[in-house]
Amino acid sequence: MARQSDAPQEFEIAVASAIAAPEAFGASFDAMPSAEALELGIGLEGDPAIAFRRTLGMFATGVTVLTTRTGETVHGMTANAFMSVSLQPPLVLVSIDRRARMSNMLHEGTRLGVNVLEAAQKVLSDHFAGRPLEGGVEPRFELVHDTPLVEGALAHLVVRVVRSYWGGDHSLFLGQVEYAHYGEGEPLLFHGGRYERLVRDPRVFSMLPQELLEPILALGEEREYADGATIMRRGEPGSELMLVVEGTVQVERPGRSLTLGPGDLVGEIEVLDPVGARIADITAVGPVRGVVVTREKLIAALEADPRAAVGLVEVLAARFRETA
Ligand code: FAD
């Protein structure tokens, strides 16, 4: 199989025209475009194949490890070319390099695990991309529907390959989803050829030293909520910060649910954002007593003691520096 010789290794690309139909595959999507047909926009120079790949790399994705089993042998590979196709019936699609070992292991009827990696699983992504860390990880699998799934992944799917398509240098596998599960956590992201992560830690005021936080809370007013009462509602403007003094609150947002208690703050980001809406529903679990600080009071407190404002800027700057 021909490869580009002067490109860096990560940009090696198989030449489509040299590839014949693989065995036991479905329809071809081969349009056979020639490399010269790809026009680069202003400012992009050099090898069109590399520029094309870099352009595709602007599409930010999560990272999955695909897993399958042949007899007693478990095989995994990292893939970000994964997409949902249909909710009813539940269908997903993966695109796999025809040179990858995985490509030869999948046929119509084969079961495939799709493991969505969590932010801390960068090492596993490298491992299953054939770049194992020296003395690195020993991946662990659990079996569901006879399919190996990577332990600790953020989400798991078991799919049965129902169609396969070939063309160019990748093959497409359409899978019917037989099992789905997700847990709590942040996803590992991939963008521009590097790993990224979401910065979603909602703690801002909680990170301030006590002597700077206390004068802010001292301007708040006490409120009581009955069991089941809505304290804050998703989509509404967020103009208040609340310290939980007594009781428990439940924070619910898509893909995430957590319980907070005395000493915890809620609405930390929204109170600093005059236009954004709340991203979570917050409900009282049993009777709750809290101290609520409005945005106006908060601004007054920051004007009274600029050290607190500087402290907040420092916390936010540290958040932006956080990358995988
Ligand atoms: P190999 O290269 O032989 O194996 C992959 C690695 O996994 C090896 O290090 C192997 O030791 C290890 N491994 C496999 N099974 C086990 C096991 N049971 N226990 C322990 N270790 C095991 N390629 C695509 O075709 N499509 C994509 O969408 C895609 N996306 C990618 C996204 C990212 C972020 C990265 C980093 C790579 C991506 N790749 C993609 C490249 C792909 O992951 C590599 O080319 C990979 O090496 C192909 O795997 P393979 O099936 O050829 O198996």
Image: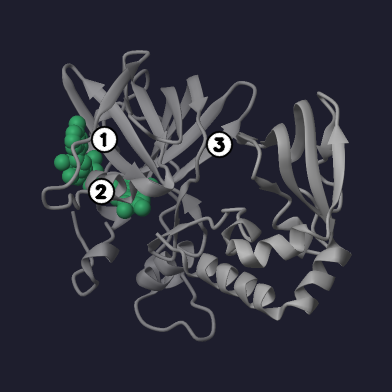
Q: Is ligand 1 less than 8 Å from the beta carbon at label 1?
A: yes
Rendered residue at 18%/16% (across/down): 71
Front position among marks 3 and 2: 2
Please name the residue that numbered disc 3 is placed on. Answer: 84
Please name the residue that numbered disc 2 is placed on. Answer: 129
For this rendering, which residue is in front, 101 or 291?
291
Image position of 223 (left or right of 183) = right
Rendered residue at 48%/46% (across/down): 187
Query: What amino acid is labelled 1 in the image?
Result: Gly
Above or below: residue 14 compared with residue 245: below
For this rendering, which residue is in front, 42 or 16?
42
Q: Residue furthest top?
A: 145
Circles 1 and 3: CB distance less than 8 Å?
Answer: no
Above or below: residue 313 compared with residue 219: below
**Pointer 2 or 1: first along the chain:** 1
Rendered location of residue 311, percent (x, y): 61, 73
Rendered residue at 43%/23% (across/down): 159
Query: What amino acid is labelled 2 in the image?
Result: Ala
Query: Dot 3, crowdedness within 10 Å: few (<14), some or many (≥20)?
Result: few
Please say whether residue 110 is visible from this viewpoint.
yes
Circle on res. 76: 1
Query: What amino acid is labelled 3 in the image?
Result: Ser
**Pointer 1 or 3: first along the chain:** 1
Query: Looking at the rendering, which quadrant does residue 23 occupy?
Result: top left
